[in-house]
Image: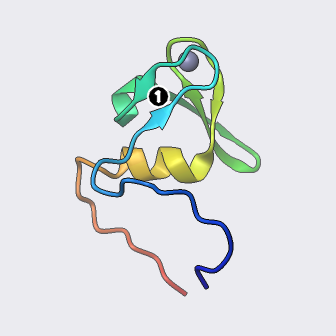
Amino acid sequence: MWGGTVAPVTVTEPSHRCDGCGATLGSKDELDHESGAGGRSWYCRYCGTAVPGIVAEKLSHRRDGSATDRRS
Ligand SMILES: [Zn+2]
């Protein structure tokens, strides 16, 4: 499953560097979200650049540990 080129990623502390303003987004407090037809969209709260959903969801689940783990 994990083949191919894998960039070295630090897993301990999920954060995302904004492509727009370079801010390090480390929690959902630093994200804006919008509910749309295709689900939730996430944005940098400082400049409004879109943040990949998979990253944002990870950040948003970091502190409040609601155990909504859905596997199928
Ligand atoms: Zn930004």
Residue shown at the point (37%, 53%) measured from the top left? 10
Q: Is residue 31 above or below residue 72?
A: above
Say if disc 1 is inside 8 Å of ligand 1: no
Q: Is residue 33 left or right of residue 31?
A: right
Rate crowding at label 1 as few (under 14), some (14 to 19) or many (20 or more) other CA atoms within 10 Å. many
Query: Within the displayed image, which quadrant is ligand 1 positioned in?
Result: top right
Q: Name the residue carrying label 1.
A: 31
Q: Is residue 32 above or below residue 47?
A: below
Tell me where residue 37 appears, x and y as whole percent: 76, 46
Q: Is residue 46 above or below residue 40?
A: above
Res 41 quadrant in image: top right
Residue shown at the point (64%, 18%) measured from the top left? 20
Q: Amino acid at mark 1?
A: Leu
Q: Quadrant of the N terminus?
A: bottom right
Tell me where residue 11 appears, x and y as whole percent: 35, 57
Q: Is residue 27 left or right of residue 19?
A: left
Colour mapping used in the image: rainbow
Q: Is residue 12 left or right of residue 32?
A: left
